[in-house]
Image (tube, rainbow, N blue to C red):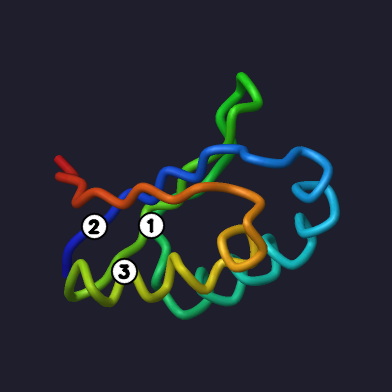
Amino acid sequence: MAFFAAMLYMKDEELNATYRPDHLAFLEGLDKEGKIFARGPFLDGTGGMVIYQSDSYEEALKLAEKDPYIVHGVRSLKLHEWGKM
């Protein structure tokens, strides 16, 4: 199992408010499946981060790309493998 940090940078604050319930429900479902290690917003309002647990970069990318924030163009996505210490 590896960890992947999805950096979700704000693109549209208005759409962010619209899709926030869908985004949170999406993450809650994955959290219950054990696919999320940590998640939360950046305190400066520029976006947030989700750390996915998966077997590969490709699997983590597929999960991250299903986030309603990404699907609807609310935020941009940058995914990096993360070294948990």
Q: Classify residue 41 by image quadrant.
A: top right
Q: Is residue 80 left or right of residue 25?
A: left
Dot 1: element: strand
Compare residues 58 and 11 and report the one nearer the observer.
Answer: 11
Q: Quadrant of residue 68?
A: bottom right
Within 10 Å of disc 1 (Cα), the crowding (few <14, some 14-19, many 20+) is some
Which quadrant, please, contains the N terminus? Answer: bottom left
**82 relative position to 70: left or right:** left
Q: Name the residue under label 1.
A: 37
Q: Nearer the viewer, mark 2 or mark 1?
A: 2
44 versus 53 height, above or below = above
Q: Is residue 56 above or below residue 69?
A: below
The amino acid sitting under disc 3 is Ala
Say which label, 2 or 1, has the lower sequence index.
2
Q: What residue type is labelled 1?
A: Phe
Circles 1 and 3, Cβ within 8 Å, touching? The answer is no
Q: Is residue 4 left or right of residue 2?
A: right
18 vs 54, left or right, is: right
Question: Tag 2: residue type?
Answer: Phe
Secondary structure of the residue carrying numbered label 2: strand
- Earlier in the chain: of badge 2 and badge 3, it is 2
Quadrant that contains the C terminus: top left
Where residue 59 appears, as percent x and y from the top left, is 28, 77
Q: CB under 8 Å between callouts 2 and 1?
A: yes
Q: Is mark 3 on a helix, strand or loop?
A: helix
Q: Residue 3 carries which label?
A: 2
The residue sitting at 74% across, 67% down in the picture is 22
Depth check: give the residue in front, 81 or 29: 81
Residue 6, given in percent of the width and then of the height, sits at 39, 51
Q: Mark 3 points at which residue?
A: 60
* Percent coordinates x, y for residue 75 in the rendering: 58, 48
